[in-house]
Amino acid sequence: MFEKIIPKQRKMSTQVGGFLILVSETMFLFSILNFLMISRLQYYSSGDSFIRVLFPNYMIFLGAMGFIGLTAMFLVYAYILPSKQRFSQEQAVKDSRSPTYNKLIEIQTELAETRKLLVKLSERVDGLPNEKT
């Protein structure tokens, strides 16, 4: 049933994917520009002078916003990213969802069997009489 609804994937060049990755990687630069423009509007808003009372200079206000942003980045880097990574990795290997993990387990099993075989062969070679010429 779902085969009729879900379109088939097409083999394409990498230009479209590369362009989308490039755009998504540079969007944060536009976010920085948007933040600067919006912060300026908020700081100089005539209806709300509270921010100008707390921060007498726009550069101090911008520095405080930067400090808050850097603090948030530290917290995300130190606590949230490791937790997200661990969660996603645990979900990927749960219930045989990951073909890569399943293949890794299969290879480990084969490697263990190969090691056992090598130990047996090594014992047999050690048991052979030494021929000295």
Image (cartoon, grey):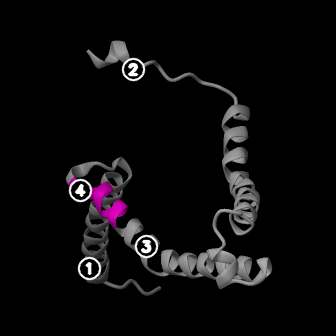
Tell me the residue that label 4 is attached to: 94
Q: Helix, strand, or loop for circle 1?
A: helix
Is label 2 or label 1 in front? 2
Quadrant where the N terminus sits is: top left
Q: For the residues marked 4 and 1, what is the alpha-carbon distance in whole angstroms? A: 39 Å
**Of the residues shown, which amino acid type is indicated by label 3?**
Ile
Residue furthest top in the image: 4
N-term mark: 2 or 1:
2
Tell me where residue 105 appears, x and y as whole percent.
Answer: 29, 59
Is label 4 or label 3 in front? 3
In the image, 34: left or right of 3?
Answer: right
Tell me the residue that label 2 is attached to: 6
Q: Depth check: 39 or 95 in front?
A: 39
Q: Is 106 colored magenta in this rendering? A: no
**Of the residues shown, which amino acid type is indicated by label 4?**
Lys
Dot 1 crowding, Cα within 10 Å, few <14, some 14–19, many 20+: few
Q: Helix, strand, or loop for circle 3?
A: helix
Residue 126 occupies quadrant: bottom left
The range drawn in magenta is 87-94
Is label 2 or label 4 in front? 2
Q: Which residue occupies 57% across, 82% down?
A: 71
Is label 4 or label 1 in front? 4
Q: Is residue 16 visible?
A: yes
Q: Are marks 4 and 1 in contact (CB under 8 Å)?
A: no
Q: For the residues marked 2 and 4, what is the alpha-carbon distance in whole angstroms? A: 25 Å
Q: For the residues marked 2 and 1, what is the alpha-carbon distance in whole angstroms? A: 57 Å
Q: For the residues marked 2 and 3, what is the alpha-carbon distance in whole angstroms? A: 34 Å
N-term mark: 4 or 1:
4
Tell me the residue that label 1 is attached to: 123
